[in-house]
Amino acid sequence: MSIIESVAKEKGPRVQLNKSLSNTAQWVKLNVGGTCFLTTKTTLCRDPNSFLCRLCSEESDLISDMDETGAYMIDRDPSYFSPILNYLRHGKLVLNKNLAEEGVLEEAEFYNITELINLVKERILQRDKKLCSEQVKKHTYRVLQCHEDELTWMISTMSDEWKFEQLVNIGSKYNYGNYDQAEFLCVVSREEGIADSPKTESTDKAKELQQRASRM
């Protein structure tokens, strides 16, 4: 065996050990609200200006307690930390159905992850727009009772936001003086999400129709 081969053989285990120690130094353990997370410095430093990157930096100006296992202790909700950490891992925001976007936004702002803050704000905006759109499509239905000679007047005086849906002859007849008049149920509807003032006007008109019909 040559001298070079002998030296290489002796250095082999040391090189492997140094490589192992180097890899170990890349791993960081976090204790978030009592739940431990294991990740790497590369992941935490996806945003170099974030709290997490500064925390694990060798030149960190942050002071943080460590538990008995050497994990950095962070007093935050661990259930909301999972989507934060996963975002740093793969750049996508994935939420469980029991987590609110507002909660993730609060955590993103605490950890100062700029791209995630913007992403969550945009998602909240799109969600609210969708909810508003769905609300507009919802309908409120009312059933108005009237007599035969009230039908024309009732339909002609109906507010523009109310839409006639159905007329039902309930089959009852009552004698008013010398005339028999059939009784009807008029079904009307309107879309929700319209301005408050037209709603109030329309509601008052519906109440007026009901009161007028009940007096007949």
Image (cartoon, rainbow, N blue to C red):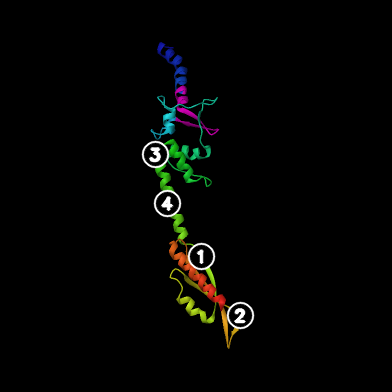
- Pick whichever of labels 1 and 3 is earlier in the sequence: 3
- On residue 162, the disc is none
Residue most extreme to the bottom: 178
Name the spot of residue 102 as percent of width and height, x first.
47, 45
The residue wearing badge 1 is: 140
- Pick whichever of labels 4 and 2 is earlier in the sequence: 4
**Can residue 86 be found in the magenta stretch?**
no
Q: Is residue 68 above or below residue 176?
A: above
Q: Which residues are magenta?
A: 20-40
Amino acid type shown at disc 1 = Thr
The answer to whether the residue labelled 2 contacts the one labelled 1, judged by CB atoms less than 8 Å apart, is no
The residue wearing badge 3 is: 114
Q: How many marks?
A: 4
The answer to whether the residue labelled 1 contacts the one labelled 3, judged by CB atoms less than 8 Å apart, is no
Question: The residue tagged with tag 2: helix, strand or loop?
Answer: strand
Which residue is rendered at x = 53% and y = 81% of the image? 148
Local crowd size for mark 3, using a 10 Å CA cut-off: few (<14), some (14–19), many (≥20): few
The CA span between labels 4 and 2 is: 52 Å
Q: Quadrant of the N terminus?
A: top left
Nearest the viewer among 27 and 55 is 55
Question: The residue tagged with tag 1: helix, strand or loop?
Answer: strand
Which residue is rendered at x = 45% and y = 51% of the image? 127
Name the spot of residue 109 as percent of width and height, x first.
43, 39
Question: The residue tagged with tag 3: helix, strand or loop?
Answer: helix
The CA span between labels 2 and 1 is: 27 Å
- On residue 172, the disc is 2
Question: The residue tagged with tag 4: helix, strand or loop?
Answer: helix
- On residue 126, the disc is 4
